[in-house]
Amino acid sequence: MKRPAWLTTLLEAGRVAHSAADGRVVGELLALEIVAIRSAGLRRTVVAADPDQLRQWTDARYPPHKVDWQTLPTRQANIVRSGGSKIGKSAHSVLPFLFKWFGDGPLSAMTRAYGMAAVCSDRLAELPVPSCWRLLTIENWEPFHRADYTAAPVPVMVAYLGGNVSEMVLDALNTFRHPPETVLHFGDYDWEGLYIFQRLQKVVPSARLYIPTNLETLFQQYGRREFLDKQKRKAAFDTDNPECRPVIRLIEQYNGGVEQEVVDLPEML
C-alpha cells in the first residue's frame, strides 16, 4: 500500500498541518502516544512525539515494495502502486470482447452454433475479418441478444459494449486487420448513452450514432425523467457534437431519456 504524502511529510519534517492528515490515522497515533497535536491560534499541527516509533509504525503499516509495479499484471500493479485494485485507468490489461458475426466463415458458424462469439481484447487484430464489412456497437444486452443481420448483403459484426465499456475494449476496436467500412452505435438516449458514444467516437472518428426516424415520438411516449436523475453530463461531454445534438435537443425538450430497449434495431447498416 502506498504511503500517504502527509505521513511522509510528518516523517521528514517532524510536523504536518492537521488539515492535511487523515483523522482516523492521527487518532490511532495519538492513542499510541506516537504523535501530538500543537495549536497556535486557529492553526493545528500534528507533530512527531516519538520519531523512532513513528518510523517503525509507518514501515509496518506501509512496507516498502521491492518489486517494480510496472512489471506486474495490471490489477496487481494497481494494488501495489496505489493500494486499490481499481485505482488506475484500467483494472485489467486484457478484457473479453463479445460479438455476433453475420456473414461467411468460422465466426458466423460460431454465432449460429452458440448464439455469439468472443475474443480477448488483445487478440482482436487476429480475427479473420474480410476487407469489406460493417460494425454495429450496442450498449445494452437485450438489443445485442435480439440482433440478427443474417440477410445483410455485407458481413456485419454486432459488438456488445455494455453500460460501462472499458478504454481497453474501445482501443482494441482500432486493431482489426481490415477496418470496418462503417461504424454505427446504438445505445440509450440519455446523457450516459451519449457519453459512451462520444468515447467510442474519440477512438473511432468515423463512428455514427443511430437515430431512428421516430425518436421524438418515442420520447413523447417513453421519455422518463428518472433516467436522468442520477446522471450528470461529464466535464468531457461535448454538447456541440453534431451526432448528439438532435438527441440533446429531445432530452432537454422532454426533460427525460429513452432506453434503447424500446427502440427497434437498425434495419440496414
Image (tube, helix red, strand yellow):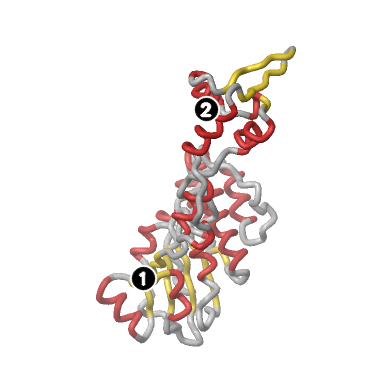
**10 in relation to 97, above or below:** above
Q: Secondary structure at mark 2?
A: helix
Q: Amino acid at mark 2?
A: Val
- Residue placed farthest to the front in the image? 52
Q: As shown in the figure, which amino acid type bears the numbered disc 1? A: Ala
Q: Residues within 10 Å of mark 1 (few under 14, many from 20)?
A: some
Nearest the viewer among 212 and 99 is 99
Labels 1, 2: front one: 2
Q: Earlier in the sequence, mark 1 or mark 2?
A: 2
Residue placed at 73% from the left, 14% from the top?
A: 40
Looking at this view, name the residue that lies furthest to the left.
113
In this rendering, position of residue 119 left or right of residue 188: left
Q: Residue furthest top?
A: 41
Q: What residue did someone put label 2 on?
A: 25
Looking at the image, residue 169 sits to the left or right of residue 113; the answer is right
Query: Residue 141's x, y, as percent?
Result: 37, 58
Residue 96 point in image, percent of width and height: 40, 65
Structural crowding at the residue carrying mark 2, measured as other residues with C-alpha within 10 Å and reported as few (<14), some (14–19) or many (≥20):
few
Residue occupying image coordinates x 53% and y 52% = 88
| Residue depicted at x 52% and y 35% | 58
Q: Check disc 1 and report its element: helix, strand or loop.
A: strand
Is residue 177 in view? yes
- The x and y percentages for residue 142 are 35, 58
Identify the residue under disc 1. 118
Spatial separation of the CA atoms under disc 1 and disc 2: 46 Å
